[in-house]
């Protein structure tokens, strides 16, 4: 996990320094095992108004649920407004099997590889939860 002081500092400094809305892509398999836990992600969402969201390709449904429980409330949105209101903080799953748990956890959707092959099917599946 990104628990070392330098990894945590980088996690905060990167979106703060970026002039454009940024999104965190969490994929420990592609990042040498480095993962951001739900506490760090919610700290980032609270402290970095330029951070526009997180895509979880870690396979951790519990992490997705904990993050959504914090950032998907109207209290969070009013207490931690985004630098650009057109880019709210989004929580996105990274696998198609995140679709059902994402909907129940109040996530904002998913970005999946399978959507390249079956976009209409996935759209219809997800839109059925609204």
Image (cartoon, rainbow, N blue to C red):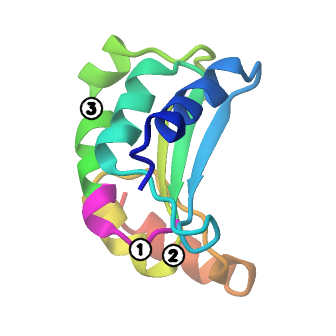
Q: Is residue 60 magenta?
A: yes
Q: Residue 57's spot in the image, x, y percent?
A: 52, 67
Q: Secondary structure at mark 2?
A: loop
Q: Nearer the viewer, residue 114 or 3?
A: 3
Q: Residue 20's spot in the image, x, y percent?
A: 76, 25
Write down the region rendered in magenta.
57-64
Q: Is residue 62 magenta?
A: yes
Residue 95 image label: 2
* Residue at horizontal 24 percent and vertical 50 percent from the top: 66
How far apart marks 3 and 1 lie (CA) works out to 23 Å
Say which label, 2 or 1, has the lower sequence index.
1
| In the displayed structure image, the side of residue 72 where residue 44 appears, left or right | right
Residue 59 image label: 1
For disc 2, the neighbor class at 10 Å (few under 14, some 14 to 19, many from 20) is some
Q: Residue 89's spot in the image, x, y percent?
A: 49, 34
Q: Secondary structure at mark 3?
A: loop
How far apart marks 2 and 3 lie (CA) works out to 23 Å
Q: Nearer the viewer, residue 32 or 101?
A: 32
Quarter of the image containing the C terminus? bottom left
Residue 73 image label: 3
* Residue at horizontal 58 percent and vertical 83 percent from the top: 121
For disc 3, the neighbor class at 10 Å (few under 14, some 14 to 19, many from 20) is few
Q: Are marks 2 and 3 in contact (CB under 8 Å)?
A: no
Q: Nearer the viewer, mark 3 or mark 1?
A: 1
């Amino acid at each position: 996990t990104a628990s070392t002081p330098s990894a945590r500092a980088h996690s905060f400094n990167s979106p703060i320094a970026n002039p454009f809305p940024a999104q965190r892509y969490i994929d420990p398999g592609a990042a040498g095992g480095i993962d951001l836990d739900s506490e760090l992600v919610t700290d980032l969402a609270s402290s970095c108004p330029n951070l526009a969201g997180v895509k979880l390709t870690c396979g951790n449904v519990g992490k997705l649920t904990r993050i959504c429980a914090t950032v998907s409330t109207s209290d969070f949105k009013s207490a931690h407004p985004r630098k650009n209101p057109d880019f709210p903080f989004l929580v996105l799953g990274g696998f198609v099997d995140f679709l059902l748990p994402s909907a129940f956890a109040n996530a904002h959707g998913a970005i999946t590889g399978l959507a390249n092959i079956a976009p209409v099917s996935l759209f219809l599946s997800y839109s059925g939860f609204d």
